[in-house]
Image: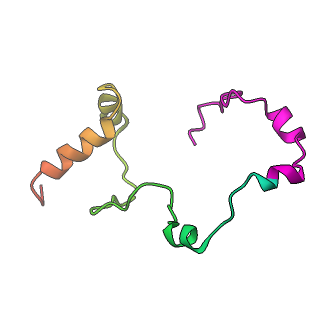
Amino acid sequence: MNGNKRASRGSSKSDLARVDAHVIRGAEYRELPELTEAMLARATVNKGGRPRASNPRVLISLRLPADVIARWKATGPGWQTRMAKRLSKAPAGT
């Protein structure tokens, strides 16, 4: 999570206090369908997150002059991606 952004409050638009106070009764369990072997056979596990990249990025530490970083940042959001594209076009050994 970005340290500069505050967590939003009340975004679920639900009465969570009422939901938390609810006590499940036996009649509510009878409304649920029986779990069958066919249901379990159709079940899938979905793992969250992003798919694995075919060409993942590598974290490095690189010291650059402050004015160089300031000029790139002045180009607006996405400056790091633009910098990476420019570096990938540079011939090796230059």
Q: Nearer the viewer, residue 12 or 36?
A: 36
Q: Position of residue 43 (x, y in %)?
A: 52, 66
Measured along the vertical axis of the image, is residue 81 above or below residue 59? above
Could you tell me which residue is drawn at 35 percent across and 61 percent down? Answer: 58
Measured along the vertical axis of the image, is residue 35 above or below residue 63? below
Could you tell me which residue is drawn at 56 percent across and 39 percent down? Answer: 2
Which residue appears farthest toward the left when viewing the image? 91
Asked where in the image residue 10 lies, by quadrant, the reply is top right
* Magenta part of the chain: 1-28
> Predominant secondary structure in magenta?
loop
Q: Position of residue 13 (x, y in %)?
A: 69, 26
Q: Is residue 38 left or right of residue 6?
A: left
Colour style of the rendered protein structure: rainbow
Which corner quadrant holds the N terminus? top right
Q: Position of residue 45 (x, y in %)?
A: 52, 65
Asked where in the image residue 20 lies, by quadrant, the reply is top right
The number of numbered badges drawn on the structure is 0
- Residue 2 among magenta residues: yes
Could you tell me which residue is drawn at 66 percent across and 33 percent down? Answer: 7
Q: Nearer the viewer, residue 15 or 11?
A: 15
Asked where in the image residue 50 lies, by quadrant, the reply is bottom left
Could you tell me which residue is drawn at 51 percent across and 56 percent down? Answer: 48
Q: Nearer the viewer, residue 10 or 45?
A: 45
Q: Is residue 12 left or right of residue 1?
A: right
Which corner quadrant holds the C terminus? bottom left
Q: Is residue 42 left or right of residue 61?
A: right
